[in-house]
Amino acid sequence: MFSFSKRIIAVGLLLILILVVTFWVGRAHDIDKATVQAQGQVTQLNNYIDTELVRFSAIPQLLTYNLLMIDFVSGEHQHYNAINNYLADIQQASGSSDIFVLNTQGEVTASSNWQVDNTFLGSNFAFRPYFKRAFAGEKVAYFALGMRSKERGIYFSQAIYHEKKAVGVVVLKVNVSKFENDRELLNTSMASHFYLQLADDVIAMSDVQAWRLNSFRKFDITQRRNIKLRRAYLDHQPTYIEQFQYTSEGVMHYKIDNKLYVSAAKPLRYFSANMYVLVDVTSVNPAQLPRLFWASIIYGLVTIIGYSLLARFAGYKKLLYSRHSLEAKVIERTQELEKAQVALVQSAKLATIGQLSAGINHEINQPLSAINTYLASAKRLLAKGNTSALGESLVVIEGLVNRVHQIVGQLKHFSKPSKMQLRPYPLAGLVNNALMISSAQLKQDNVQVEPPQFDETVVVWVDSLKFEQVLVNLITNASQAMNGAIIRNLSFQLECFEERVKLSILDTGSGIEQHAFGNLFEPFYSTKSSKGLGLGLSISKQIIDSFNGCLSAHNRVEGGAEFIISLSNRQENKDD
Ligand code: ADP
Protein backbone atom coordinates (compact mmCIF):
# COMPACT_ATOMS: atom_id res chain seq x y z
CA MET A 1 0.00 0.00 0.00
CA PHE A 2 1.04 3.58 -0.73
CA SER A 3 1.74 5.76 2.27
CA PHE A 4 -0.20 9.03 2.53
CA SER A 5 2.77 11.27 1.66
CA LYS A 6 3.67 9.10 -1.33
CA ARG A 7 0.09 9.39 -2.53
CA ILE A 8 0.23 13.18 -2.20
CA ILE A 9 3.47 13.25 -4.24
CA ALA A 10 1.92 10.97 -6.91
CA VAL A 11 -1.18 13.19 -7.12
CA GLY A 12 1.04 16.30 -7.37
CA LEU A 13 3.24 14.79 -10.09
CA LEU A 14 0.20 13.71 -12.06
CA LEU A 15 -1.21 17.24 -11.78
CA ILE A 16 2.04 18.70 -13.10
CA LEU A 17 2.01 16.21 -15.98
CA ILE A 18 -1.61 17.05 -16.82
CA LEU A 19 -0.88 20.79 -16.71
CA VAL A 20 2.16 20.42 -18.98
CA VAL A 21 0.18 18.29 -21.47
CA THR A 22 -2.78 20.71 -21.31
CA PHE A 23 -0.45 23.64 -21.93
CA TRP A 24 1.24 22.11 -24.96
CA VAL A 25 -1.91 20.64 -26.47
CA GLY A 26 -3.75 23.95 -25.96
CA ARG A 27 -0.85 25.92 -27.39
CA ALA A 28 -0.55 23.65 -30.41
CA HIS A 29 -4.30 23.96 -30.96
CA ASP A 30 -4.17 27.76 -30.84
CA ILE A 31 -1.18 27.89 -33.19
CA ASP A 32 -2.97 25.54 -35.60
CA LYS A 33 -5.98 27.82 -35.47
CA ALA A 34 -3.83 30.89 -36.18
CA THR A 35 -2.11 29.09 -39.07
CA VAL A 36 -5.43 28.11 -40.61
CA GLN A 37 -6.53 31.71 -40.22
CA ALA A 38 -3.35 32.95 -41.92
CA GLN A 39 -3.87 30.51 -44.80
CA GLY A 40 -7.47 31.64 -45.22
CA GLN A 41 -6.47 35.27 -45.25
CA VAL A 42 -3.63 34.89 -47.69
CA THR A 43 -5.94 33.10 -50.13
CA GLN A 44 -8.60 35.77 -49.72
CA LEU A 45 -6.10 38.59 -50.18
CA ASN A 46 -4.50 37.01 -53.24
CA ASN A 47 -7.88 36.41 -54.87
CA TYR A 48 -8.78 40.02 -54.41
CA ILE A 49 -5.47 41.44 -55.68
CA ASP A 50 -5.30 38.95 -58.57
CA THR A 51 -8.76 39.96 -59.69
CA GLU A 52 -7.84 43.63 -59.53
CA LEU A 53 -4.60 43.10 -61.43
CA VAL A 54 -6.36 41.16 -64.19
CA ARG A 55 -8.88 43.96 -64.48
CA PHE A 56 -6.16 46.63 -64.68
CA SER A 57 -4.00 44.63 -67.09
CA ALA A 58 -6.87 44.44 -69.58
CA ILE A 59 -7.07 48.23 -69.94
CA PRO A 60 -3.73 48.90 -71.76
CA GLN A 61 -4.56 46.04 -74.10
CA LEU A 62 -7.90 47.63 -74.94
CA LEU A 63 -6.20 50.96 -75.52
CA THR A 64 -3.74 49.46 -78.00
CA TYR A 65 -6.71 48.58 -80.23
CA ASN A 66 -8.18 52.06 -80.02
CA LEU A 67 -7.96 53.73 -83.46
CA LEU A 68 -7.75 57.21 -81.99
CA MET A 69 -4.77 56.02 -80.00
CA ILE A 70 -3.12 54.32 -83.01
CA ASP A 71 -3.63 57.47 -85.13
CA PHE A 72 -2.20 59.57 -82.36
CA VAL A 73 0.86 57.46 -81.71
CA SER A 74 1.60 56.85 -85.37
CA GLY A 75 1.58 60.65 -85.77
CA GLU A 76 -1.24 60.76 -88.28
CA HIS A 77 -3.62 62.85 -86.18
CA GLN A 78 -2.21 64.77 -83.23
CA HIS A 79 -5.46 65.38 -81.28
CA TYR A 80 -3.76 66.21 -78.00
CA ASN A 81 -6.74 67.30 -76.05
CA ALA A 82 -8.95 64.52 -77.28
CA ILE A 83 -6.47 61.78 -76.42
CA ASN A 84 -5.51 63.31 -73.03
CA ASN A 85 -9.17 63.64 -72.05
CA TYR A 86 -9.81 60.13 -73.21
CA LEU A 87 -6.98 58.80 -71.01
CA ALA A 88 -8.21 60.88 -68.06
CA ASP A 89 -11.71 59.43 -68.45
CA ILE A 90 -10.46 55.87 -68.51
CA GLN A 91 -8.18 56.53 -65.54
CA GLN A 92 -11.17 57.85 -63.58
CA ALA A 93 -13.45 55.01 -64.57
CA SER A 94 -10.91 52.25 -63.85
CA GLY A 95 -9.74 53.60 -60.49
CA SER A 96 -6.09 53.50 -61.60
CA SER A 97 -3.57 56.25 -60.72
CA ASP A 98 -2.32 57.30 -64.14
CA ILE A 99 -2.48 56.24 -67.77
CA PHE A 100 0.06 57.62 -70.21
CA VAL A 101 1.47 57.02 -73.66
CA LEU A 102 5.17 56.93 -74.60
CA ASN A 103 6.56 57.40 -78.08
CA THR A 104 9.33 55.25 -79.51
CA GLN A 105 11.92 57.37 -77.61
CA GLY A 106 10.25 56.75 -74.28
CA GLU A 107 8.87 60.30 -74.00
CA VAL A 108 5.44 60.83 -72.55
CA THR A 109 3.28 62.23 -75.36
CA ALA A 110 -0.14 61.89 -73.74
CA SER A 111 -1.19 61.44 -70.10
CA SER A 112 -4.30 61.33 -67.98
CA ASN A 113 -2.63 63.86 -65.66
CA TRP A 114 -1.97 66.31 -68.46
CA GLN A 115 -3.68 69.11 -66.57
CA VAL A 116 -1.83 68.89 -63.20
CA ASP A 117 1.36 70.75 -62.36
CA ASN A 118 3.71 67.84 -62.23
CA THR A 119 2.24 66.15 -65.28
CA PHE A 120 4.19 63.32 -66.86
CA LEU A 121 3.97 65.03 -70.25
CA GLY A 122 7.46 65.56 -71.58
CA SER A 123 9.14 63.15 -69.12
CA ASN A 124 11.29 60.41 -70.48
CA PHE A 125 10.84 56.93 -69.11
CA ALA A 126 12.96 55.13 -71.67
CA PHE A 127 15.12 53.62 -68.90
CA ARG A 128 12.12 51.99 -67.27
CA PRO A 129 11.88 48.26 -67.89
CA TYR A 130 8.12 48.58 -68.43
CA PHE A 131 8.92 50.68 -71.52
CA LYS A 132 11.79 48.61 -72.87
CA ARG A 133 10.13 45.26 -72.40
CA ALA A 134 6.75 46.40 -73.74
CA PHE A 135 8.41 47.95 -76.75
CA ALA A 136 10.09 44.59 -77.34
CA GLY A 137 6.61 43.05 -77.54
CA GLU A 138 6.10 41.87 -73.94
CA LYS A 139 2.94 42.40 -71.96
CA VAL A 140 4.41 43.86 -68.79
CA ALA A 141 3.37 44.19 -65.15
CA TYR A 142 6.15 45.92 -63.23
CA PHE A 143 6.52 47.30 -59.71
CA ALA A 144 8.39 50.59 -59.27
CA LEU A 145 8.53 53.82 -57.35
CA GLY A 146 7.04 56.73 -59.30
CA MET A 147 9.65 59.23 -60.40
CA ARG A 148 7.50 62.24 -59.87
CA SER A 149 4.91 61.08 -57.39
CA LYS A 150 7.44 59.00 -55.39
CA GLU A 151 4.59 56.62 -54.85
CA ARG A 152 4.84 52.87 -55.19
CA GLY A 153 2.90 51.49 -58.08
CA ILE A 154 2.41 48.58 -60.42
CA TYR A 155 2.86 49.54 -64.05
CA PHE A 156 0.99 47.63 -66.76
CA SER A 157 2.36 48.37 -70.23
CA GLN A 158 1.89 47.16 -73.76
CA ALA A 159 3.15 48.30 -77.18
CA ILE A 160 0.87 50.03 -79.74
CA TYR A 161 1.31 48.76 -83.23
CA HIS A 162 0.81 50.48 -86.56
CA GLU A 163 1.34 48.50 -89.69
CA LYS A 164 2.92 45.71 -87.59
CA LYS A 165 5.45 48.09 -86.14
CA ALA A 166 5.65 49.24 -82.53
CA VAL A 167 4.96 52.95 -82.59
CA GLY A 168 4.53 53.60 -78.91
CA VAL A 169 3.72 52.14 -75.50
CA VAL A 170 0.63 52.67 -73.34
CA VAL A 171 1.18 52.47 -69.57
CA LEU A 172 -1.33 52.19 -66.71
CA LYS A 173 -0.15 52.77 -63.18
CA VAL A 174 -1.93 51.56 -60.01
CA ASN A 175 -0.84 52.88 -56.66
CA VAL A 176 -0.37 49.92 -54.31
CA SER A 177 -1.46 52.02 -51.33
CA LYS A 178 -4.95 51.36 -52.71
CA PHE A 179 -4.62 47.73 -51.56
CA GLU A 180 -2.92 48.55 -48.31
CA ASN A 181 -5.81 50.69 -47.25
CA ASP A 182 -8.24 47.82 -47.62
CA ARG A 183 -7.70 46.73 -44.02
CA GLU A 184 -11.04 44.97 -43.86
CA LEU A 185 -9.45 42.36 -46.11
CA LEU A 186 -7.61 41.20 -43.03
CA ASN A 187 -10.70 40.59 -41.07
CA THR A 188 -9.31 38.43 -38.28
CA SER A 189 -10.02 37.79 -34.63
CA MET A 190 -6.29 37.90 -33.91
CA ALA A 191 -3.94 40.75 -34.84
CA SER A 192 -2.33 40.13 -38.20
CA HIS A 193 -0.21 41.76 -40.89
CA PHE A 194 0.47 41.14 -44.56
CA TYR A 195 3.22 41.93 -47.01
CA LEU A 196 3.83 41.38 -50.71
CA GLN A 197 7.40 40.35 -51.44
CA LEU A 198 8.82 40.85 -54.93
CA ALA A 199 11.16 38.45 -56.70
CA ASP A 200 14.14 40.47 -55.40
CA ASP A 201 12.87 40.00 -51.80
CA VAL A 202 11.93 43.67 -51.44
CA ILE A 203 8.55 44.27 -49.84
CA ALA A 204 6.33 46.05 -52.35
CA MET A 205 3.35 46.57 -50.10
CA SER A 206 2.37 45.94 -46.50
CA ASP A 207 -0.01 47.25 -43.89
CA VAL A 208 3.08 47.90 -41.73
CA GLN A 209 4.60 51.13 -42.97
CA ALA A 210 8.10 50.32 -41.72
CA TRP A 211 8.26 47.20 -43.86
CA ARG A 212 7.43 48.95 -47.14
CA LEU A 213 10.32 48.97 -49.66
CA ASN A 214 12.49 47.21 -47.06
CA SER A 215 13.34 43.54 -46.74
CA PHE A 216 13.49 40.57 -44.37
CA ARG A 217 16.69 39.63 -46.16
CA LYS A 218 20.17 41.05 -45.76
CA PHE A 219 21.51 42.10 -49.18
CA ASP A 220 25.18 41.87 -50.06
CA ILE A 221 27.05 44.57 -51.98
CA THR A 222 26.36 43.07 -55.43
CA GLN A 223 22.68 42.80 -54.77
CA ARG A 224 22.61 46.35 -53.51
CA ARG A 225 24.39 47.56 -56.64
CA ASN A 226 21.96 45.69 -58.88
CA ILE A 227 19.01 47.19 -57.08
CA LYS A 228 20.48 50.64 -57.46
CA LEU A 229 21.18 50.10 -61.14
CA ARG A 230 17.64 48.95 -61.86
CA ARG A 231 16.30 52.16 -60.30
CA ALA A 232 13.01 50.48 -59.62
CA TYR A 233 13.05 52.12 -56.20
CA LEU A 234 14.94 55.16 -57.56
CA ASP A 235 17.54 56.17 -54.95
CA HIS A 236 15.93 54.24 -52.10
CA GLN A 237 18.06 51.40 -50.72
CA PRO A 238 15.94 48.68 -48.97
CA THR A 239 17.00 48.21 -45.34
CA TYR A 240 17.02 45.00 -43.37
CA ILE A 241 14.07 44.48 -41.01
CA GLU A 242 15.34 42.92 -37.74
CA GLN A 243 13.58 39.62 -37.15
CA PHE A 244 14.13 35.95 -36.44
CA GLN A 245 12.52 33.18 -38.48
CA TYR A 246 12.20 29.49 -37.77
CA THR A 247 10.06 26.61 -38.98
CA SER A 248 8.13 24.45 -36.54
CA GLU A 249 5.93 21.55 -37.70
CA GLY A 250 5.98 22.91 -41.25
CA VAL A 251 4.83 26.38 -40.19
CA MET A 252 7.02 29.43 -40.55
CA HIS A 253 7.31 31.44 -37.32
CA TYR A 254 8.51 35.06 -37.16
CA LYS A 255 9.78 36.94 -34.13
CA ILE A 256 9.62 40.68 -34.84
CA ASP A 257 9.84 43.39 -32.17
CA ASN A 258 9.30 40.81 -29.39
CA LYS A 259 6.16 39.57 -31.06
CA LEU A 260 5.62 36.06 -32.32
CA TYR A 261 3.78 35.36 -35.59
CA VAL A 262 2.83 32.30 -37.61
CA SER A 263 2.76 32.82 -41.35
CA ALA A 264 1.18 31.56 -44.54
CA ALA A 265 2.45 32.43 -48.05
CA LYS A 266 1.03 32.20 -51.54
CA PRO A 267 2.26 33.51 -54.91
CA LEU A 268 0.12 35.95 -56.90
CA ARG A 269 -1.05 34.53 -60.23
CA TYR A 270 -0.77 37.65 -62.40
CA PHE A 271 2.27 39.24 -60.84
CA SER A 272 5.63 37.78 -59.95
CA ALA A 273 5.45 38.22 -56.18
CA ASN A 274 4.50 36.28 -53.03
CA MET A 275 1.89 37.35 -50.57
CA TYR A 276 2.53 36.66 -46.85
CA VAL A 277 0.09 36.90 -43.95
CA LEU A 278 1.43 36.90 -40.38
CA VAL A 279 -0.94 36.17 -37.50
CA ASP A 280 0.12 37.35 -34.06
CA VAL A 281 0.44 34.45 -31.58
CA THR A 282 2.37 36.36 -28.89
CA SER A 283 -0.48 35.90 -26.43
CA VAL A 284 -0.77 32.18 -27.08
CA ASN A 285 1.12 31.31 -23.85
CA PRO A 286 -0.89 33.49 -21.42
CA ALA A 287 -4.03 32.35 -23.30
CA GLN A 288 -3.45 28.88 -21.84
CA LEU A 289 -4.00 30.10 -18.26
CA PRO A 290 -7.82 29.61 -18.24
CA ARG A 291 -7.31 26.12 -19.69
CA LEU A 292 -4.77 25.30 -16.97
CA PHE A 293 -7.18 26.65 -14.37
CA TRP A 294 -10.05 24.47 -15.59
CA ALA A 295 -7.79 21.45 -16.02
CA SER A 296 -6.72 21.85 -12.35
CA ILE A 297 -10.34 22.19 -11.21
CA ILE A 298 -11.47 19.13 -13.18
CA TYR A 299 -8.45 17.13 -12.05
CA GLY A 300 -9.14 18.16 -8.43
CA LEU A 301 -12.80 17.09 -8.70
CA VAL A 302 -11.93 13.81 -10.41
CA THR A 303 -9.29 13.10 -7.75
CA ILE A 304 -11.70 13.82 -4.89
CA ILE A 305 -14.52 11.76 -6.44
CA GLY A 306 -12.12 8.94 -7.37
CA TYR A 307 -10.57 8.96 -3.93
CA SER A 308 -13.92 8.84 -2.14
CA LEU A 309 -15.10 6.03 -4.44
CA LEU A 310 -11.92 4.09 -3.75
CA ALA A 311 -12.29 4.71 -0.02
CA ARG A 312 -15.87 3.51 -0.20
CA PHE A 313 -14.85 0.46 -2.14
CA ALA A 314 -12.06 -0.28 0.34
CA GLY A 315 -14.52 0.20 3.23
CA TYR A 316 -16.99 -2.09 1.51
CA LYS A 317 -14.29 -4.73 1.02
CA LYS A 318 -13.27 -4.41 4.65
CA LEU A 319 -16.90 -4.71 5.70
CA LEU A 320 -17.34 -7.76 3.52
CA TYR A 321 -14.19 -9.27 4.96
CA SER A 322 -15.19 -8.56 8.55
CA ARG A 323 -18.69 -9.92 7.85
CA HIS A 324 -17.18 -13.11 6.50
CA SER A 325 -14.80 -13.47 9.41
CA LEU A 326 -17.62 -12.65 11.81
CA GLU A 327 -19.81 -15.31 10.24
CA ALA A 328 -16.94 -17.79 10.46
CA LYS A 329 -16.44 -16.86 14.11
CA VAL A 330 -20.16 -17.24 14.83
CA ILE A 331 -20.17 -20.69 13.20
CA GLU A 332 -17.07 -21.67 15.16
CA ARG A 333 -18.53 -20.39 18.44
CA THR A 334 -21.87 -22.08 17.75
CA GLN A 335 -20.07 -25.37 17.24
CA GLU A 336 -18.10 -24.84 20.45
CA LEU A 337 -21.29 -23.99 22.32
CA GLU A 338 -23.06 -27.03 20.96
CA LYS A 339 -20.19 -29.19 22.17
CA ALA A 340 -20.21 -27.42 25.55
CA GLN A 341 -23.96 -27.88 25.70
CA VAL A 342 -23.66 -31.63 25.20
CA ALA A 343 -20.95 -31.72 27.84
CA LEU A 344 -23.11 -29.66 30.19
CA VAL A 345 -26.08 -31.91 29.74
CA GLN A 346 -23.87 -34.86 30.43
CA SER A 347 -22.33 -33.30 33.52
CA ALA A 348 -25.78 -32.27 34.74
CA LYS A 349 -26.89 -35.87 34.40
CA LEU A 350 -23.85 -37.01 36.32
CA ALA A 351 -24.55 -34.39 38.97
CA THR A 352 -28.13 -35.59 39.25
CA ILE A 353 -26.87 -39.17 39.57
CA GLY A 354 -24.46 -38.02 42.25
CA GLN A 355 -27.22 -36.29 44.18
CA LEU A 356 -29.49 -39.28 43.87
CA SER A 357 -26.92 -41.99 44.41
CA ALA A 358 -27.24 -41.96 48.19
CA GLY A 359 -31.01 -42.36 48.04
CA ILE A 360 -30.80 -44.94 45.29
CA ASN A 361 -28.16 -46.79 47.23
CA HIS A 362 -30.58 -47.02 50.11
CA GLU A 363 -33.45 -47.89 47.76
CA ILE A 364 -31.51 -50.78 46.16
CA ASN A 365 -29.99 -51.99 49.42
CA GLN A 366 -33.37 -52.29 51.01
CA PRO A 367 -34.88 -54.78 48.46
CA LEU A 368 -31.51 -56.57 48.29
CA SER A 369 -31.49 -57.23 52.08
CA ALA A 370 -35.15 -58.25 51.82
CA ILE A 371 -34.24 -60.64 48.97
CA ASN A 372 -31.46 -62.04 51.15
CA THR A 373 -33.87 -62.63 54.06
CA TYR A 374 -36.50 -64.24 51.77
CA LEU A 375 -33.86 -66.49 50.13
CA ALA A 376 -32.70 -67.74 53.54
CA SER A 377 -36.28 -68.56 54.53
CA ALA A 378 -36.88 -70.14 51.09
CA LYS A 379 -33.94 -72.42 51.65
CA ARG A 380 -35.40 -73.48 54.98
CA LEU A 381 -38.90 -73.99 53.51
CA LEU A 382 -37.34 -76.08 50.71
CA ALA A 383 -35.58 -78.28 53.32
CA LYS A 384 -38.85 -78.73 55.13
CA GLY A 385 -40.67 -79.43 51.88
CA ASN A 386 -43.17 -76.64 52.46
CA THR A 387 -43.63 -75.87 48.78
CA SER A 388 -46.66 -73.61 49.09
CA ALA A 389 -44.86 -71.23 51.50
CA LEU A 390 -41.76 -71.51 49.30
CA GLY A 391 -43.81 -70.40 46.28
CA GLU A 392 -45.09 -67.30 48.14
CA SER A 393 -41.52 -66.39 49.14
CA LEU A 394 -40.33 -66.70 45.52
CA VAL A 395 -43.17 -64.39 44.34
CA VAL A 396 -42.08 -61.79 46.90
CA ILE A 397 -38.42 -62.23 45.76
CA GLU A 398 -39.52 -61.80 42.14
CA GLY A 399 -41.36 -58.59 43.09
CA LEU A 400 -38.29 -57.28 44.89
CA VAL A 401 -35.98 -58.10 41.92
CA ASN A 402 -38.38 -56.28 39.56
CA ARG A 403 -38.23 -53.23 41.78
CA VAL A 404 -34.42 -53.19 41.69
CA HIS A 405 -34.66 -53.54 37.89
CA GLN A 406 -36.92 -50.57 37.70
CA ILE A 407 -34.59 -48.38 39.74
CA VAL A 408 -31.51 -49.40 37.74
CA GLY A 409 -33.49 -49.02 34.51
CA GLN A 410 -34.26 -45.37 35.31
CA LEU A 411 -30.64 -44.62 36.09
CA LYS A 412 -29.37 -45.89 32.79
CA HIS A 413 -31.30 -43.08 31.06
CA PHE A 414 -28.69 -40.65 32.44
CA SER A 415 -25.66 -42.64 31.45
CA LYS A 416 -25.27 -41.53 27.82
CA PRO A 417 -26.31 -38.54 25.69
CA SER A 418 -29.65 -39.30 24.12
CA LYS A 419 -31.02 -38.18 20.84
CA MET A 420 -34.14 -36.10 20.59
CA GLN A 421 -37.20 -38.16 19.71
CA LEU A 422 -40.49 -36.27 20.02
CA ARG A 423 -43.35 -38.69 20.41
CA PRO A 424 -46.71 -38.57 22.13
CA TYR A 425 -46.57 -39.89 25.71
CA PRO A 426 -49.29 -40.01 28.37
CA LEU A 427 -48.36 -37.28 30.82
CA ALA A 428 -49.42 -39.31 33.89
CA GLY A 429 -46.89 -42.09 33.14
CA LEU A 430 -44.04 -39.60 32.68
CA VAL A 431 -44.80 -37.84 36.01
CA ASN A 432 -45.08 -41.19 37.86
CA ASN A 433 -41.71 -42.34 36.46
CA ALA A 434 -40.09 -39.11 37.61
CA LEU A 435 -41.68 -39.47 41.04
CA MET A 436 -40.36 -43.01 41.29
CA ILE A 437 -36.80 -41.86 40.44
CA SER A 438 -37.07 -39.06 42.98
CA SER A 439 -38.76 -41.10 45.63
CA ALA A 440 -35.59 -41.64 47.69
CA GLN A 441 -34.92 -37.86 47.79
CA LEU A 442 -38.57 -37.17 48.63
CA LYS A 443 -38.52 -39.74 51.36
CA GLN A 444 -35.24 -38.37 52.74
CA ASP A 445 -36.69 -34.85 52.85
CA ASN A 446 -39.89 -36.11 54.38
CA VAL A 447 -42.04 -34.78 51.63
CA GLN A 448 -45.71 -35.55 51.31
CA VAL A 449 -46.53 -36.23 47.65
CA GLU A 450 -50.04 -35.74 46.29
CA PRO A 451 -49.99 -38.31 43.46
CA PRO A 452 -51.27 -36.78 40.20
CA GLN A 453 -54.74 -37.91 39.10
CA PHE A 454 -54.32 -37.16 35.40
CA ASP A 455 -56.56 -38.44 32.67
CA GLU A 456 -54.62 -41.19 30.84
CA THR A 457 -55.63 -39.66 27.48
CA VAL A 458 -53.65 -36.46 28.12
CA VAL A 459 -50.52 -36.74 25.99
CA VAL A 460 -47.55 -34.51 25.37
CA TRP A 461 -45.14 -34.51 22.39
CA VAL A 462 -41.78 -34.93 24.07
CA ASP A 463 -38.63 -37.00 24.29
CA SER A 464 -39.63 -39.11 27.31
CA LEU A 465 -36.16 -39.49 28.82
CA LYS A 466 -35.37 -35.82 28.64
CA PHE A 467 -38.79 -34.82 29.91
CA GLU A 468 -38.41 -37.16 32.89
CA GLN A 469 -34.99 -35.63 33.50
CA VAL A 470 -36.67 -32.18 33.69
CA LEU A 471 -39.37 -33.46 36.04
CA VAL A 472 -36.80 -35.19 38.29
CA ASN A 473 -34.86 -31.93 38.45
CA LEU A 474 -37.94 -29.84 39.32
CA ILE A 475 -39.15 -32.40 41.89
CA THR A 476 -35.67 -32.61 43.46
CA ASN A 477 -35.43 -28.78 43.62
CA ALA A 478 -38.92 -28.63 45.23
CA SER A 479 -38.00 -31.34 47.69
CA GLN A 480 -34.77 -29.53 48.66
CA ALA A 481 -36.60 -26.17 48.93
CA MET A 482 -39.02 -27.72 51.43
CA ASN A 483 -36.18 -28.98 53.61
CA GLY A 484 -36.73 -27.24 56.95
CA ALA A 485 -40.32 -26.21 56.18
CA ILE A 486 -43.10 -27.22 58.52
CA ILE A 487 -45.50 -28.25 55.77
CA ARG A 488 -43.75 -30.24 53.06
CA ASN A 489 -46.24 -30.84 50.33
CA LEU A 490 -45.54 -31.62 46.68
CA SER A 491 -48.49 -31.50 44.29
CA PHE A 492 -49.20 -31.33 40.54
CA GLN A 493 -51.85 -29.40 38.59
CA LEU A 494 -52.88 -29.84 35.00
CA GLU A 495 -54.73 -27.45 32.69
CA CYS A 496 -55.65 -28.55 29.19
CA PHE A 497 -56.23 -26.16 26.32
CA GLU A 498 -57.05 -26.86 22.70
CA GLU A 499 -53.45 -27.23 21.57
CA ARG A 500 -51.46 -27.01 24.75
CA VAL A 501 -51.24 -28.45 28.21
CA LYS A 502 -49.97 -26.66 31.26
CA LEU A 503 -48.36 -28.74 34.03
CA SER A 504 -47.58 -27.06 37.36
CA ILE A 505 -45.25 -28.49 40.02
CA LEU A 506 -46.16 -26.88 43.34
CA ASP A 507 -44.29 -26.96 46.60
CA THR A 508 -44.68 -25.42 50.03
CA GLY A 509 -41.03 -24.61 50.49
CA SER A 510 -39.11 -21.35 51.00
CA GLY A 511 -40.11 -19.97 47.63
CA ILE A 512 -37.72 -18.43 45.09
CA GLU A 513 -35.56 -15.65 46.50
CA GLN A 514 -36.58 -12.31 45.03
CA HIS A 515 -33.14 -11.46 43.66
CA ALA A 516 -32.88 -14.93 42.06
CA PHE A 517 -35.67 -14.33 39.52
CA GLY A 518 -33.41 -12.60 36.99
CA ASN A 519 -30.85 -15.44 36.95
CA LEU A 520 -32.96 -18.47 37.75
CA PHE A 521 -32.54 -20.10 34.34
CA GLU A 522 -28.92 -18.97 33.87
CA PRO A 523 -26.29 -21.74 33.95
CA PHE A 524 -24.35 -22.05 37.23
CA TYR A 525 -26.79 -19.93 39.18
CA SER A 526 -27.33 -21.60 42.53
CA THR A 527 -28.16 -20.53 46.05
CA LYS A 528 -27.17 -23.92 47.41
CA SER A 529 -23.55 -22.99 48.10
CA SER A 530 -21.29 -25.97 47.43
CA LYS A 531 -24.14 -28.42 47.12
CA GLY A 532 -25.64 -27.07 43.88
CA LEU A 533 -24.14 -26.89 40.39
CA GLY A 534 -26.71 -24.35 39.19
CA LEU A 535 -27.24 -26.28 35.94
CA GLY A 536 -30.55 -28.01 36.54
CA LEU A 537 -32.94 -25.19 35.61
CA SER A 538 -30.93 -23.91 32.64
CA ILE A 539 -30.76 -27.41 31.14
CA SER A 540 -34.43 -28.01 31.95
CA LYS A 541 -35.40 -24.80 30.18
CA GLN A 542 -33.38 -25.69 27.11
CA ILE A 543 -34.94 -29.13 26.98
CA ILE A 544 -38.47 -27.69 27.27
CA ASP A 545 -37.59 -25.06 24.65
CA SER A 546 -36.46 -27.86 22.35
CA PHE A 547 -39.99 -29.33 22.66
CA ASN A 548 -41.30 -25.93 21.52
CA GLY A 549 -42.56 -25.53 25.05
CA CYS A 550 -42.01 -23.02 27.80
CA LEU A 551 -40.68 -23.28 31.37
CA SER A 552 -41.44 -20.49 33.84
CA ALA A 553 -41.56 -20.00 37.62
CA HIS A 554 -43.14 -17.81 40.23
CA ASN A 555 -43.83 -17.82 43.94
CA ARG A 556 -47.21 -18.92 45.22
CA VAL A 557 -49.37 -16.53 47.25
CA GLU A 558 -49.83 -19.14 49.97
CA GLY A 559 -46.02 -19.73 50.11
CA GLY A 560 -43.71 -21.95 48.13
CA ALA A 561 -42.85 -21.99 44.45
CA GLU A 562 -44.70 -23.01 41.31
CA PHE A 563 -42.84 -24.22 38.21
CA ILE A 564 -45.00 -24.30 35.06
CA ILE A 565 -44.29 -26.39 31.99
CA SER A 566 -46.36 -25.45 28.96
CA LEU A 567 -46.27 -28.00 26.13
CA SER A 568 -47.92 -28.80 22.85
CA ASN A 569 -50.24 -31.78 22.83
CA ARG A 570 -49.88 -32.38 19.13
CA GLN A 571 -47.09 -32.89 16.70
CA GLU A 572 -45.17 -29.82 15.69
CA ASN A 573 -42.33 -29.38 13.30
CA LYS A 574 -39.47 -28.44 15.54
CA ASP A 575 -37.71 -26.49 12.79
CA ASP A 576 -40.68 -24.21 12.17
P1 ADP B 1 -29.14 -26.04 41.82
O1 ADP B 1 -30.31 -26.82 42.22
O2 ADP B 1 -27.91 -26.82 41.58
O3 ADP B 1 -28.89 -24.82 42.68
P2 ADP B 1 -30.88 -25.23 39.72
O4 ADP B 1 -30.63 -24.59 38.41
O5 ADP B 1 -31.68 -26.43 39.67
O6 ADP B 1 -29.49 -25.43 40.40
O7 ADP B 1 -31.60 -24.15 40.61
C1 ADP B 1 -31.11 -22.86 40.67
C2 ADP B 1 -31.64 -22.13 41.88
O8 ADP B 1 -33.03 -21.90 41.77
C3 ADP B 1 -31.52 -22.85 43.18
O9 ADP B 1 -30.22 -22.71 43.75
C4 ADP B 1 -32.57 -22.19 44.02
O10 ADP B 1 -32.10 -20.97 44.58
C5 ADP B 1 -33.64 -21.85 43.03
N1 ADP B 1 -34.77 -22.83 43.06
C6 ADP B 1 -34.97 -23.86 42.19
N2 ADP B 1 -36.12 -24.50 42.48
C7 ADP B 1 -36.66 -23.88 43.55
C8 ADP B 1 -37.86 -24.08 44.34
N3 ADP B 1 -38.76 -25.08 44.10
N4 ADP B 1 -38.11 -23.24 45.39
C9 ADP B 1 -37.22 -22.25 45.66
N5 ADP B 1 -36.08 -21.99 44.97
C10 ADP B 1 -35.80 -22.83 43.90
Image (cartoon, helix red, strand yellow):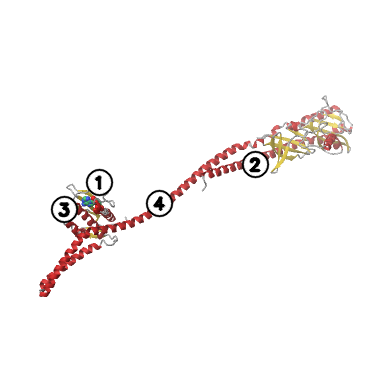
Q: Is residue 295 left or right of residue 495?
A: right
Q: Secondary structure at mark 4?
A: helix
Give the residue type that dot 2 points to: Ala
Q: Are marks 1 and 3 in contact (CB under 8 Å)?
A: no
Q: Which mark is residue 269?
A: none
Residue to which mark 3 is pinned: 489
Residue lying at 15% horizontally and 66% vertically, measured from the top left: 370
**For residue 515, which numbered disc appears in the image?**
1
Q: Nearer the viewer, mark 2 or mark 1?
A: 1
**Element at label 2:** helix
Identify the element where label 3 is drawn: strand
The secondary element bearing badge 1 is classed as helix
Residue 28, which numbered label?
2
Q: Check whether the beta carbons of the residues at disc 2 and disc 1 lie within 8 A of each other.
A: no
| In front: label 4 or label 1 | 1
Among numbered discs 4 and 1, the one appearing first in the sequence: 4
